[in-house]
Image (cartoon, rainbow, N blue to C red):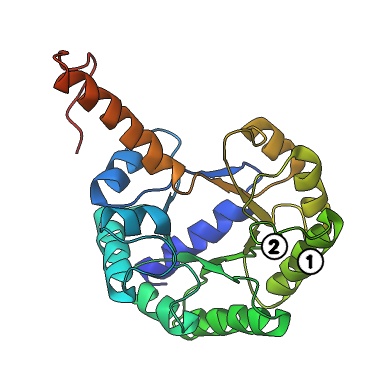
Amino acid sequence: MTPTAEKAAELRRLHDDPELLVMVNVWDVISAKTLAELDGCRAIATASHSVAAAAGYPDGEHIPRDEMLEAARRIAAAVDLPVSADLEAGYGDAAETVRRAIGFGVVGANIEDEMRPFDDAVAVVAAVTAAAEKEGVPFALNARTDAFLRAGDRDPEEVLDEAIRRGRAFLDAGATCVFVPGRLNEATVGRLVDGIGQRKVSVIAVPGSPGLDALQRLGVARVSLGPWSQRIALTAWADAAAGILKGASLPEGVRAIG
């Protein structure tokens, strides 16, 4: 087994492990290296919003694919842990994008469905899975459905049913896990797990969402922070910078990192 395949198998194992997989998302080499050195960090995940923002682009595939993949390559080369890349909706060819990412040492990815027609969304998952298999890598595909993010004024029960329908189909098409972002309460998360499967649901932590203990108890496989990691860092930096510009001293506790 190649080193990339070994990391991929480990990332798949972490999704199946009884312990909740916590991903504090990164956006560049220094954030990845800093995170990788912390106790409890078992894998690295990028956040597309944060990578794009750091390069001066808005979210939503405005950053060129080559730039997004280069950021993932640099991160994967900088750490020894498995790296999962947020590759948005795949930049027009999700299978090819994932194939190229694997060549850069990336062993997992988020791919969004953007609520495209059901059959088309499932076909993308199947194509990504086939591409990874052809590369000989047990790729950890965190297949994302935007059912809640694009719910609009639809009935909440219909939205939940659609998320479960897509989630089951994505798993059948080869996905490792189903990512359902949104501000979800415990009851909704529980119903998603019941409908999609234990240790098969991935969620995002946002202000007001269930805590890690609750997600563990509910049977969630993975939780990520998405752009909130970068927002935490930039909030601390902006607050410190604002104080310094007004004459404050350098904050206590600052240490060299990286």
Answer whether residue 98 is visible to the viewer in this image: yes
Please, what secondary structure does the residue beneath circle 1 have? helix
Residue 1 drawn at (x, y percent): 42, 72
- Label for residue 147? 2
- Name the quadrant containing residue 36: top left
Report the residue marked by disc 1.
Answer: 162
Labels 1 and 2: the sequence-earlier one: 2
Horizontal relation, residue 158 to residue 251: left or right: right
Task: State left or right for residue 226 relative to residue 72.
Answer: right
- The picture places residue 153, in percent across and down from the top left corner, at 76, 58
Residue pictured at 32% horizontal, 36% vertical: 234
Hey, what amino acid is under mark 2? Ala
Q: Name which residue lies at 69% across and 62% down.
A: 147
User: Where's residue 51, x and y in %?
Assistant: 33, 57
Q: In the image, what residue occupies the spot 66% across and 31% down? A: 213
Label 2 crowd bin: few (<14), some (14–19), many (20+), radius 10 Å: many
Judge left or right: residue 232 versus residue 220: left
- Nearest the camera: 224 or 42? 224
As displayed, is residue 176 above or below residue 232? Answer: below
Q: Position of residue 13 (x, y in %)?
A: 57, 56
- For this rendering, which residue is in front, 33 or 92? 92
Residue 82 seen by the camera: no
Relative to residue 121, is residue 192 drawn left or right?
Answer: right
Q: Looking at the image, is 33 positioned above or below residue 168? A: above
Secondary structure type for disc 2 = loop
In the rendered structure, are the residues bearing label 1 and label 2 in contact, judged by CB atoms less than 8 Å apart? yes
Give the amino acid at mark 1.
Glu
Q: Name the residue: 65% across, 65% down.
A: 145
